[in-house]
């Protein structure tokens, strides 16, 4: 079913990302929900569906699904949780689209809140370790960053990417983050800064690894027809694509690139456009290699080798050919786990509404956002536009 332009985003919300021990997941969810209502021009009573996701760090939030809704006076006909790792927000968008177009929902509020930045280290390590196969991976100490380090080493040996080019992705992200008041790290960095920052898992440097953070995000969706009657600028969902490639890293084969391309091709086909029509790309990227893989899979660069050279030369940085990850991404804005996936969509929508402040891209009309679950297990692509 082609749903191009039939649903729209009318509200969004986010909050400063970083380490905020005084903030609870519920407080963050309330803050971004109220912002989403404000940017949508809606009253709380107009929301009829809430979709949230687990915190991954706060058991109270995980159990009290609608606690934040109660706090702001929401009384809806439907409320539930969804979980698909870092791609949870993209899964929410697909489900919300179906609910709206089937007439079961009118205004859907989607919220993700996480306290990863202040989560105790031993709990974080244990939680992440349990994501791996209990027989073939977990007993050997296999971990997400280890999987990325192995893949990155292979890319270096195959001469697809150089250490300097990888560092260039982190530098580009930081340039954008310097203009984002909600980013965790805003001080500018150089290639040398990255290469001299030490290793967290050879060959991944400290400044090439995402800082774990607290953060939250919210989106409000409605039908395109209903959006036209609202006092705000609607952003339409032009295309969506998704895929599931593997569960255990040992079965990844192409490392998720095949799944990324599958999702991208489906999104482009639904939107009826191609890579050359994209004005900005908001790319889910815990590590530099993720950005380069997505640029290739999305067709925005010919291949990973081309993408590495292009990013190193500033192609995705402020003033470059195509703005990439304009909020600073997980490498600088901060990695707030499941909430982080939604923040990429929030940034794309904010840019299309012309509300990105100092980092605003000039007159964008079409933007894409990606999301990823696990270490590339599932891939999602959304294409947004100012016109249906």
Image (cartoon, helix red, strand yellow):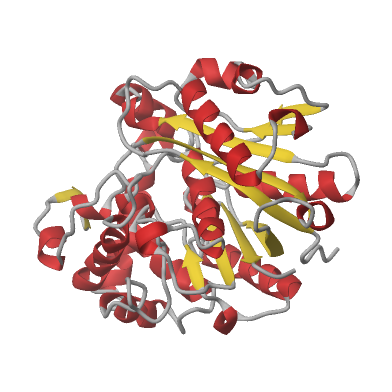
Asked which quadrant contains residue 240, the reply is bottom right
> Which of the pair 25/240 is nearer the observer?
25
Outermost residue toward the right in this view: 103
Asked which quadrant contains residue 52, the reply is top right
Quarter containing the N terminus? bottom right
Q: Residue at x 42, y 36 (%)?
A: 215
Residue 262 position within the rendered picture, expressed as x and y whole percent measured from the top left: 64, 68
Horizontal arrangement in the rendering, residue 161 relative to residue 56 (left or right):
left
> How many dots with numbers?
0
In the rendered image, the vertical position of residue 37 relative to residue 281, given as above or below? above
Residue 75 position within the rendered picture, expressed as x and y whole percent measured from the top left: 76, 22
Q: Is residue 252 visible?
A: no
Outermost residue toward the front in this view: 231
Q: Residue at x 54, y 38 (%)?
A: 35
Q: Residue at x 29, y 66 (%)?
A: 172
Residue 176 position within the rendered picture, expressed as x and y whole percent measured from the top left: 32, 61
Horizontal arrangement in the rendering, residue 117 relative to residue 388 (left or right):
left
Quarter containing the C terminus? bottom right
Horizontal arrangement in the rendering, residue 175 relative to residue 323 (left or right):
left
> Which of the pair 164/230 is nearer the observer?
230
> Which of the pair 244/22 is nearer the observer?
22
Q: Is residue 227 visible?
A: yes
Asked which quadrant contains residue 334, the reply is top left
Q: Residue at x 70, y 23 (%)?
A: 74
> Which of the pair 173/69 is nearer the observer?
69
Horizontal arrangement in the rendering, residue 261 relative to residue 181 (left or right):
right
Residue 238 position within the rendered picture, expressed as x and y whole percent measured from the top left: 71, 66
In the rendered image, the vertical position of residue 31 relative to residue 175, given as above or below? above
């Amino acid at each position: 079913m082609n749903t191009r332009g039939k649903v729209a985003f009318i509200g969004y919300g986010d909050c400063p990302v970083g380490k905020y021990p005084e903030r609870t997941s519920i407080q963050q969810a309330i803050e971004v929900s109220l912002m989403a209502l404000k940017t949508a021009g809606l009253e709380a009573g107009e929301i009829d569906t809430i979709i949230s996701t687990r915190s991954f760090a706060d058991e109270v939030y995980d159990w009290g699904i609608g606690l934040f809704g109660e706090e702001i006076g929401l009384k809806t006909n439907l409320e539930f949780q969804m979980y698909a790792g870092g791609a949870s927000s993209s899964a929410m968008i697909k489900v919300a689209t179906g609910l709206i177009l089937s007439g079961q929902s009118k205004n859907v509020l989607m919220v993700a809140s996480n306290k990863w930045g202040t989560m105790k280290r031993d709990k974080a390590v244990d939680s992440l370790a349990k994501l791996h196969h209990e027989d073939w991976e977990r007993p050997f100490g296999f971990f997400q960053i280890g999987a990325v380090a192995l893949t990155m080493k292979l890319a270096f040996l195959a001469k697809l990417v150089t250490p300097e080019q990888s560092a260039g992705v982190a530098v580009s992200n930081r340039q954008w983050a310097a203009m984002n008041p909600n980013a965790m790290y805003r001080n500018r960095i150089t290639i040398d800064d990255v290469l001299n920052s030490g290793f967290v898992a050879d060959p991944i440097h400290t400044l090439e690894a995402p800082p774990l953070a607290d953060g939250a995000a919210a989106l409000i969706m409605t039908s395109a027809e209903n959006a036209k009657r609202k006092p705000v600028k609607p952003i339409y969902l032009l295309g969506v694509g998704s895929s599931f490639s593997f569960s255990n890293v040992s079965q990844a084969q192409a490392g998720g690139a095949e799944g990324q391309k599958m999702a991208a091709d489906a999104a482009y086909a639904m939107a009826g456009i191609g890579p050359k029509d994209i004005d900005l790309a908001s790319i889910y990227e815990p590590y530099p290699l993720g950005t380069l893989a997505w640029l290739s899979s999305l067709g925005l660069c010919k291949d990973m080798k081309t993408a590495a050279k292009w990013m190193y030369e500033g192609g995705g940085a402020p003033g470059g050919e195509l703005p990439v990850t304009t909020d600073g991404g997980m490498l600088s804005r901060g990695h707030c786990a499941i909430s982080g996936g939604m923040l990429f969509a929030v940034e794309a929508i904010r840019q299309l509404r012309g509300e990105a402040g100092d980092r605003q891209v000039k007159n964008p009309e079409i933007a894409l956002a990606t999301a990823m679950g696990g270490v590339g297990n599932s891939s999602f692509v959304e294409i947004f536009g100012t016109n249906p």
